[in-house]
Amino acid sequence: MRSTADNTAEETWPGTGTTLRFVRVAGLSPDGALSEREAAVYAAFRMEKRRAEWLAGRLAAKSLLTAASGRRPEECEIGMDRLGRPCCGETLVSISHSGGWALAAVRPGSAFLGADLERVEERHQAWYSDYFHPSELPGHDPSEATRIWTIKEAVLKALGLGLMADPLHVRTGERVMLSGKALERYRELGSPAYSVETRAFPEGFWTAVVADSILK
């Protein structure tokens, strides 16, 4: 399914085997979908924008989790694994939000999962020079830079590092090359084979998903 007419979209990406749900951030309410612990976290946010984004990401994730498990949303509590990656029990979840949209990605059984959503927009020149190798982005192209950035973030999320690691330690190209802290963590995780998918969706955005390869 790919439709944003009702402010949601859900689809499965075959290259990574992940299911993604996109949700508009505005106008959402918990409606009993949060566990007691999650409700306390939600109530503690001081900034309305951050509260709304957090809720949208959780609701998107819970929609996927309930469809896969048959449990009620409040029973699908989203916590963190030992590396700080969002999870529901043993199921990894990846959540992102940008420009009024939230995204959640799930693939049951995955031990290496990351997703990122970014709006395409012009950035300060320092962003291009600080976070991209010349070989990755030889010219000034906001759309391609955003696509590459989503890959970097998705990989770092799958590693459980986020932006605690230098984005330059994820070099994109024909294949992703890791160095520094990113490579150290990747080796700690057993150097899993993984796939990367990117799509220009929703309109004006790029989304990237990274997931360990499905054994056949």
Image (spheres, rainbow, N blue to C red):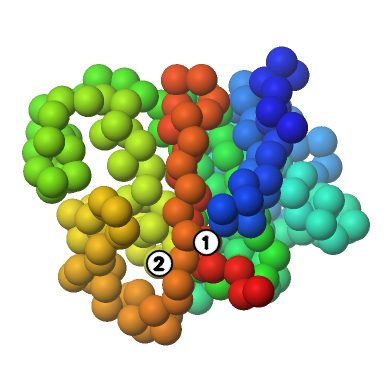
Q: Which amino acid does the dot numbered 2 rest on?
A: Leu
Q: Residues within 10 Å of mark 1 (few under 14, many from 20)?
A: many
Using the rendered image of the protein, determine whether residue 117 is visible from the camera's viewpoint: yes
State the residue position of label 2.
159
Q: Nearer the viewer, mark 1 or mark 2?
A: 1
State the residue position of label 1.
211
Question: Residue extending furthest top?
Answer: 5
Position in image of residue 157 (x %, y %): 42, 58
Using the rendered image of the protein, determine whether residue 85 is visible from the camera's viewpoint: no
Q: Residue at horizontal 35%, vertical 37%? A: 147
Q: Is residue 214 left or right of residue 204?
A: right
Position in image of residue 2 (x %, y %): 69, 28
Q: Which amino acid does the dot numbered 1 rest on?
A: Ala
Quarter of the image holding residue 52?
A: top right
> Who is closer to the viewer here, 48 or 176?
176
Position in image of residue 177 (x %, y %): 25, 63
Alpha carbon separation for disc pair 1 and 2: 11 Å
Quarter of the image holding residue 131?
A: top left
Q: Residue at horizontal 62%, vertical 75%? A: 215
Q: Residues within 10 Å of mark 2 (few under 14, many from 20)?
A: many
Tag 1 secondary structure = strand
Q: Residue at horizontal 60%, vertical 69%? A: 214
Tag 2 secondary structure = loop
Q: Earlier in the sequence, mark 1 or mark 2?
A: 2
Q: Is residue 189 left or right of residue 165?
A: right
Q: Residue at horizontal 63%, vertical 56%? A: 17
Determine which of the numbered discs, if any, sits on residue 63 in the image. none
Position in image of residue 101 (x %, y %): 55, 28
